[in-house]
Image: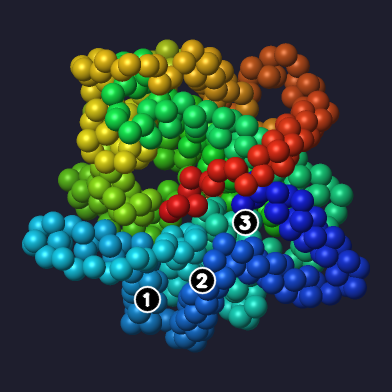
Amino acid sequence: MLFSSQTFLVVFLPALVLGTILLGRLGSRKLVAWYLLLASLIFYGWWEPRYLLLIAVSIYVNFAIGKKLHAKPSKLFVGAGIVFNLAILGYFKYANFFLDNINFLAGTHWDAGTIILPLAISFFTFQQIAYLVDVYQGKAEDHDLGQYALFVTFFPQLIAGPIVHHKEMMPQFNKPEVFHLTGENLKIGLLIFSIGLYKKIVIADGISVYSDAVFAADTVSPTFLEAWAAALSYTFQIYFDFSGYSDMAVGLARIFGIRLPMNFCSPYRASSIILFWRHWHMTLSRFLRDYLYFPLGGNRHGTARRYANLITVMLLGGLWHGAGWTFIAWGALHGLYLVVNHAWNALGRTMQWTSGGWIGRWAGRVLTFVAVVVAWVFFRADDFSDAGTILLAMSGMGDAAPTQSMVNGAAWFWIAILLGVVWILPNTHEWFAGHNPTVEPEYGAPDSLLRHRWIWEGWSGALWRHRMLFFAPFAAILGSVGLAVAIYRGSEIVSFIYMAF
């Protein structure tokens, strides 16, 4: 069941809100919590009911190990829990990938059969690994099985994140005001959801036709302009698709009084790859930092070890996104970007270079954006051959001579519009900042949050402070358009990109 589907928008969400209101009037928060847990399980099982057993087993085993760790911290138990989670993830997501590579190298013919990837397995696996490590380190409190199950399966963040921490969610579940619907939470939640719905249905799905025209072509042979149009279109498609999902998740959670962590904060404004990864899929970046980069030693053992750790983390981050060499190449490329960025910063400190002011920031922004666009080619391409063909065309060295144009002028119109949107307009969090829509990141608000506010305050400080007076109706209109398009398309609704991970 997709957030953008008719079933969810017309049946599931209204029934869930109405049921929560009715149960809330009975005065039992625990009853509402169990109702949300049941709804979340129905939401997950709608796709494939048999995998309810898998997520139930995963929840129970991790909860049982967590209980043991609460009673007595043990490296053996936390290690066993991590192995258990990675074994499940490894079998369902990577078994055939590894067997295919072994067969290629050894000339064997091993076959694991058809394995259907369970929905959201990467997300709830990482979430529960983080929980076990937090319990072992004394950072997570003890709770009953029902609360823990709701923490894992809470439907807004279950399918594609944000990847939440136990200490972010469980204390909220115990607050008296949570699960009691209020007019303020319903208004803010629906408005944020509306923005996300519009991002997905209208923008991401709309511009996908231009990237698919090249990347999904039977014979990839684009011209220079077509290759860049396809790469840029996918750059915006994946951002508005995933940030749209994140907005919808944040909005849905807010309806029930829950604040999820921020997952996107204008990443394409970033003036360096380091800042890009502070702004893009922020909860995954946090997980990789806290549970992989730091345990590997971080930057505590010299420059060479730090760079090796960065490469390792990004390689594994690429593999997490998908069982394919193109994803690994994407991760490796970003790892190399980070190494170059850190080395450049170190050289700048040694040479005492200045930042270059606004010219330097914009130069860094353009360079970072182009680097990210190039890397997305590996992420989107079906294989290295297609990626190489498109990159050669983007470099001007392709030998394309297509019989018909795969991308028309409308693509460049939308690319120009969306480039202005991501570089200039405030993001969702900025618009709703006065209403505390999300849990602030532990390392503080990302740098881009206030980067462009002077544009708006230059008109009038009062206008910015009262921005919701005109933005709320605008968001409602966007949501109505998104809802109308979703209902019109019906079964033609496209899945979210990150649901495949």
For the residues labelled 2 and 1, the Cα–Cα distance comes to 17 Å
Q: Residues within 10 Å of mark 2 (few under 14, many from 20)?
A: some
Which amino acid, mark 1? Phe
Q: Nearer the viewer, mark 1 or mark 3?
A: 3
For the residues labelled 3 and 2, the Cα–Cα distance comes to 14 Å
For label 2, the SS is helix
Q: Quadrant of the N terminus?
A: bottom right
Q: Position of residue 22 (x, y in %)?
A: 88, 66
Q: Nearer the viewer, residue 495 or 142?
A: 495
Question: Does residue 172 appear in this view?
Answer: yes
- Residue at (21, 17) in percent of width and height: 399
For label 3, the SS is loop
For label 1, the SS is helix
- Residue at (23, 23) in percent of width and height: 392
Reading the image, the residue beneath label 3 is 1
Which amino acid, mark 2? Tyr
500 relative to 323 in the view: left or right:
right
107 relative to 155 in the view: left or right:
left
Q: In the image, is residue 256 above or below residue 251?
A: below
Q: Nearer the viewer, residue 394 or 79?
A: 394
The disc placed on residue 84 is: 1
Disc 3 or 2, which lies upstream in sequence?
A: 3
Is there CB contact under 8 Å for labels 3 and 2?
no
Q: In the image, is residue 279 above or below residue 135?
A: above
* Residue 378 in which image quadrant: top left
